[in-house]
Image: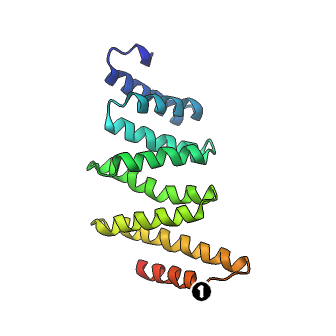
Amino acid sequence: LAENAPTAEEQTNAYFWLARTYEENLQDYQNAVANYEKVISLGTSDDMTARSLYYSGVLYSKELKDDEKSLAALQELANRFSAEEGADIKMMVTDANLRVPELLVSLGKFGDAVTRAKKVRDDALAGDNAEEKVNAQYQLAYLLGEQAGQAADSGSPDPDLSREAAAEYEKVY
């Protein structure tokens, strides 16, 4: 059906709405992400591409339990669309930036998660959105606290890391 649409824009639209139908109405997440991937590969609409990256990233994580693919989709979204001005895309990028460190932790890449959280925090602090600043700061503080807790639990407490986590928490409040 979608492949027979006369233009690439119409194909993009058809694949996107097929994906949404598979996801929301049929809970057929494999077919949903397959159609989102077609939207992404066509690349005719930044809005549809960003939405497809976001929705597929969330589906890979929550429903398909594939954190590697989720991470790839959400990182691509954040990298490609971080400068977009549209409110919907900004919201998806903000959420992706918060999800990426969590995915990195689940994949055993704790150091990468902290590095990414610091970048997200720094970017948020340079902006003017108070909610983004608080969320990014809290996430960094949480990850540092977790890292300090893991060090202590393993018998190698790191007082400097604990102090850094406490200082980051203090900045949240």
Residue 44 placed where, x, y %? 32, 29
Residue 117 placed where, x, y %? 47, 65
Residue 50 placed where, x, y %? 38, 41
Task: Name the residue that disc number 1 marks.
Answer: 159
Q: Quadrant of the C terminus?
A: bottom left
Name the residue located 52 percent from the left edge and 79 percent from the top edge.
Answer: 165
The kind of residue on which mark 1 rests is Pro
Residue 126 vs 11, above or below: the answer is below
Residue 117 vs 68, above or below: the answer is below
Residue 131 can be seen, yes or no = no
- Of 11 and 154, nearer the camera is 154
Specify few, some or many for label 1: CA neighbours under 10 Å numbering under 14, 14-19, or 20 or more: few
Question: Dividing the picture into quarters, in which one does residue 80 lie?
Answer: top left
Name the residue located 62 percent from the left edge and 57 percent from the top edge.
Answer: 106
Residue 152 can be seen, yes or no = yes
Side of 9 relative to 14 (left or right) = left
Residue 124 vs 64, above or below: the answer is below
Name the residue located 46 percent from the left edge and 27 percent from the top edge.
Answer: 18
Q: Quadrant of the N terminus?
A: top left
- How is this picture coloured? rainbow
Name the residue located 46 percent from the left edge and 79 percent from the top edge.
Answer: 168
Side of 65 relative to 79 (left or right) = right
